[in-house]
Image (cartoon, grey):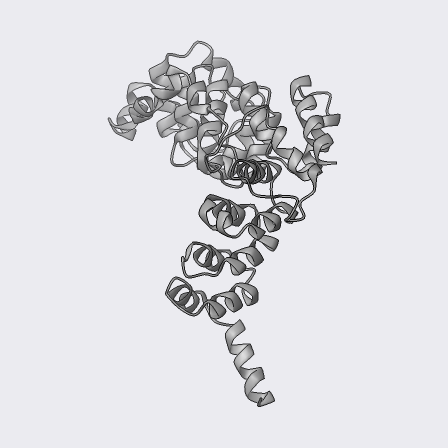
């Protein structure tokens, strides 16, 4: 009742650091405390993740988090089917959250129907329940893989990867003889590996032309010792093993992957590898670029389209440079969502 003390306590509570919070929210503490932390620190994703997976956390708290969670937090909520089977109001919060991906909504609604949960009693409209029919006739009771984001579990991408991609791990080990040995053995020009030398203006064009006739072992050596820009260019190699080795190189960053994902000149095997990497497709913008890249196999592109936001679906539906299949998929999802 002391106003001054109350103000100080509230201020201190709202300013608790991650180190203290993370030590608290994973423990067996009163549900009211966890609920209050979830509300006051709603912008702290790492803390909310711990609260969501804490068995002590009240179902009502998870319901509250589900009303404002982003797609990554929603993924964690969706995986705990036992909780929302026990407390179906969480389903309503998931469906009504504008951050929830269409594929996530579809998965939860399908699960609810198969579990004989009365969606009408929860106040979920029939228009919303129709979403789960959109996913190309595929209905899964397994939690979505994503990431990121969303439910890309209907992707059978592993089956799409060619033998070249599967052997890329071996190919990437070409650096084992040592940097200097490779440079000398394969007569690699200094501008290919020395970051201190300015890149010639026509080097990219020249290197790409050379790749058409260059032996695979020399290309792999260039991937291993090459400077950053050269590694990016090698993702355009006509040889799948080489392109995948370039994409998998430790020096390649997520920003590089984003650029490769939207590059229509990138090797198809490199694009397939990115499609199968769960860390990369957890990044929404990478997934969007993969959906639009004609080198992405159609089944994978369609799966990515089904997990995009409405604004991007609208752009795809109007984009005549995108295949008709993807346009129609986008239009179908938008129609069911309207």
Position of the N terminus by quadrant: bottom right
Residue 296 seen anywhere in this rendered image of the structure: no
Seen at 44% across and 9% down, the residue is 213
Tally of marks: 0
Left or right position of 34 against 294: left
Asked whether the viewer can see residue 21, the reply is yes
- Quadrant containing the C terminus is top right
Q: Position of residue 185 (x, y in %)?
A: 28, 19
* Side of 124 where 48 appears, left or right: left
Please identify the quarter of the rendering in which residue 14 is found: bottom right
Residue 194 location, quadrant: top left
> Compared to 95, does 180 lie above or below?
above
Q: Classify 10 as above or below 35.
A: below
Q: Is residue 275 above or below residue 7?
A: above
Q: Nearer the viewer, residue 56 or 197?
A: 56
Q: Residue furthest top?
A: 213
- Residue in the picture at 36% in, 21% down: 166
- Return the x and y of residue 42 as percentages of the image width and height: 56, 61
Question: How far across and how far down the image is residue 195, in percent?
Answer: 43, 36
At horizontal 57% and vertical 49% (from top left) the residue drawn is 70
Q: Position of residue 136 (x, y in %)?
A: 59, 24
Viewed as shown, does residue 93 lie left or right of 181?
A: right
């Amino acid at each position: 009742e002391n106003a001054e003390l109350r103000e100080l306590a509230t201020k201190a509570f709202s300013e608790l650091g991650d180190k203290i919070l993370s030590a608290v929210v994973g423990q067996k503490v009163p549900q009211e405390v966890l609920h209050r932390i979830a509300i006051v620190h709603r912008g702290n994703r790492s803390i909310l993740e711990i609260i969501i997976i804490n068995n002590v956390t009240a179902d009502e708290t998870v319901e509250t988090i589900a009303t404002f969670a982003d797609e990554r937090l929603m993924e964690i909520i969706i995986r705990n089917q036992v909780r929302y089977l026990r407390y179906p109001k969480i389903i309503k919060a998931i469906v009504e959250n504008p951050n929830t991906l269409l594929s996530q909504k579809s998965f939860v609604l399908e699960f609810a129907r198969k579990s004989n949960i009365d969606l009408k009693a929860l106040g979920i409209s029939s228009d919303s329940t129709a979403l789960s029919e959109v996913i190309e006739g595929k209905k899964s009771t397994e939690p979505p893989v994503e990431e990121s984001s969303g439910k890309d579990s209907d992707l059978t991408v592993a089956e799409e990867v060619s033998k070249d991609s599967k052997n890329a791990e071996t190919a990437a080990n070409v650096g084992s003889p040592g940097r200097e040995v490779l440079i000398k053995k394969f007569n690699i020009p200094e501008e290919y590996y020395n970051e201190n030398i300015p890149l010639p203006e026509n080097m990219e064009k020249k290197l790409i032309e050379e790749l058409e006739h260059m032996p695979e072992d020399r290309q792999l050596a260039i991937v291993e010792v090459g400077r950053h820009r050269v590694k990016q260019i090698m993702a355009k190699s006509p040889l799948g093993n080489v392109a995948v080795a370039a994409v998998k190189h430790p020096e390649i960053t997520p920003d590089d992957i984003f650029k490769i994902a939207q590059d229509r000149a990138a090797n198809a095997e490199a694009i397939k590898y990115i499609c199968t990497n769960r860390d990369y497709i957890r990044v929404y913008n990478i997934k969007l670029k993969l959906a639009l890249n004609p080198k992405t196999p159609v089944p994978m592109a369609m799966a990515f389209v089904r997990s995009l936001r409405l604004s991007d679906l609208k752009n795809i539906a109007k984009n005549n440079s995108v295949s008709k299949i993807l346009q129609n998929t986008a239009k179908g999802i938008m129609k069911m969502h309207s």
